[in-house]
Every structure is written in C-alpha cells, then in structure tokens.
Image (spheres, rainbow, N blue to C red):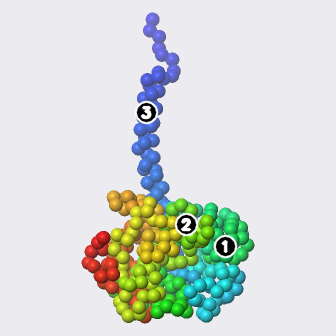
Amino acid sequence: MRHSRQGGFTLIELLVVIAIIALLIGILLPSLAGARASARAMKSASNARQVAQAVTIYTVSEKYFPASYLYPKDPVGTDWRLQDQVENHPTPGNGYIHWSQFLFDSGSLPEEAFKNPAALRGGAPATNPGPNSDDWEPGQVNGTGGGPGSQLPVDRQVKRVGYTGNGALFPRNKFNGSGPRKNIFVNPALVDGSQSGASKTILIAEFISTGNWNVIGAAAGAGFESKSHRAVSPFLGISSGSNVYNEPPGGPRFHYPTTSAIKPLAEVPAYAIDTPNLSLLNCLGRSHPGKGTERREGGTGVYAFVDGHAEQMSVKDTIRKRLWGDAYYSLSGDNKVKKGWGPNGGTNPDAP
C-alpha cells in the first residue's frame, strides 16, 4: 500500500526556500536603500526650496539678502548696532544672530525646514546652543568656553541647521573691519542683472555632514566650537587666498578654484571651515547618491538657487558650471570674479 506524505518540508526543500528568500533579500535591500536615499534627497530639495523662497520674501521687504550673522547688542533679543560689527566679537556673552532667525522668527518658515534629512541629527548645532544638552555635540564648547547645558549665551538661531548660504550673497558681519575689504549688504537686483542671473546663481547649499560636525567648527582646547553661523565663501583671492578681506581693492581679484581644490569626503579635515587657504566649498554636503566619480568622492548635494529652484549635483559640478555668481557681491571694492578657474584664469576647471 502506498502511503501519502503528511504535511511538512524535507530538509532539502527548506534549504531551497531559505536560499530563495536570501536571494530576494539581496535583490530588494539595495533597491529599498536606494529608494530611501532618493526620498531623503527629495525632502532636502523641498526644504532648500522653502528656505530659498523665504529668503526671497525677506529681500522683498528688506531690499537686501540677510547677513549670515550679526553680533547682537544684548544677551537676548535681535537688536544690533553697526558699530559692533567688527573683526572680533566685542561681547561674546551676547552670542550671535543667525540668518535663520530672520526667516524663522517672522513665521514665514518652520524650524524643521532648516533640517537636512540625510545629515547627522538634521544639521550642525549652533555656536551657543543654550541649556538643552540635546542641542550640543560631543566635544563641543560654546563661544565663551562653556560645555553642554551652559545657560548662556544662546544664539538666535534654529537648533539644527543643515544648510548654509552663499557667502558672496550672505555677507559676514565685518562691516567695520580693518582690512582693505569690508562686508556690504547685497541687493538681489545685482544678481538679477548679472550674466549668470538668478537661475544660475546658488543661494543655499547643504553643509557637509561627517563625524560630530567638527568639520564645521574651529579647534577649541580639547574640543571644538561650532561655526554653523558662517556662510561659505565660494571664491579665493588672487594674492590672499581664503583671507579675502586682505585682497587689494583693485580688480578683478577673486577667482573660482579648480576642482582639484575639492577633497574626497574621507580626506576633508576636521575644522575645515576654519582652515586657512582650504577652499570652503569642501564644507558642502555630499549626503546623497552619485554616480562614478561622484560616488567615490562622497556623493552629491542639494543646491537652491536665487530664483527658488533646486538641483542635485556634486560640489565639483558647481565649480565647472560657475554657479556661485559673477562677483563677490558681499565685499567692498571691485569685487568681480575673474573668468576661468584658478588665480591665473585658466580655461580648464579640472586642472591640477
């Protein structure tokens, strides 16, 4: 008599099923990871567009792009005095007023819009985060040397900022510096009327996200002080390099770097934003997928332009396409940028 087999699998059948499941997981997981990465890039582009559009609203009422930061008159509030905007903070205990405050405090933009979903904790901490230890990074000290939980100073800034401004449009606050160049406020009409125009001039970019954000910081004892209040300067001086305030006032005296100035992500040093003669474009994000060389060098970032649209590309492509503007608008004197790339105006953006 033939006996029918009762329910269940043989060992071989179980192994076959397990192998099929493992194969499917191997196929699907990269696709799912890619989908998540694409979703983060799309969300970051949406946030960057919102920030750029809020800046446009600000310029309609104020006639100028915001300063990247200001020294306030008091420990609280947003009042500031022109005479206090000098090379070194006259009253470090008053903290900073960051450009995000002008957009966030006006109600035109929620705080979440300043976060990059692909970045560590959404963005870099403030220089002076205040009493909530969660707003600090390990090893961080504030502008007066205090550690996590220090009550004061507190910057007027969103808690986490994933984006920075184009330093050629967002002036630092050196309106009364001692060098031959000083910061000046920038009227958007200068960009609108330029050869590149608003659609070819970057306004907002992602900060680089590595480690504990010490790349966007300066060494401070055994720790670091966050410099997230700074905009990123895209240009270098012909004779002064990154010390653009000491560039002689004749012009054109500023230039685009060549792409060789951009280090692979793994080689960007700690405290890059405070490293002399390192192109500050090294401090820009590479949090999203790229292809070929882009992937090997760390990926791509999201950039929002003066006209409000956003694009995803590599840092090097922003150099090749000369997307940072035609002048160092936020500096006094003849602030035109030389044609070409490098201090001699070479025709090859990828020259060593």
Q: Residues within 10 Å of mark 2 (few under 14, many from 20)?
A: many
The three-letter amino acid code for the residue at tag 1 is: Gly
The residue shown at (43%, 45%) is 28
Q: Earlier in the sequence, mark 3 or mark 1?
A: 3
Q: Nearer the viewer, mark 3 or mark 2?
A: 2
The residue shown at (33%, 81%) is 343
Judged from the image, the secondary structure of the residue bearing numbered disc 1 is loop
Q: CA distance from mark 3 to mark 1?
A: 57 Å
Q: Earlier in the sequence, mark 3 or mark 2?
A: 3
92 sits to left or right of 175: right
What residue is disc 2 on? 214
Q: Nearer the viewer, mark 2 or mark 1?
A: 1
Of 42 and 171, nearer the camera is 171
Residue sticking out furthest to the front? 221
295 sits to left or right of 150: left
Do the residues bearing badges 2 and 1 touch, measured as CB atoms within 8 Å?
no
What residue is disc 3 on? 19
Quadrant of the rendered image containing residue 20: top left
What residue is disc 1 on? 145
Residue 120 location, x and y as percent?
A: 55, 61
Of 189 and 214, nearer the camera is 214
User: Of the numbered discs in the image, which one, if any, rests on residue 21?
Assistant: none
Judged from the image, the secondary structure of the residue bearing numbered disc 3 is helix
Of 193 and 79, nearer the camera is 79
The three-letter amino acid code for the residue at tag 3 is: Ala
The residue shown at (29%, 82%) is 345
Q: Nearer the viewer, mark 3 or mark 1?
A: 1
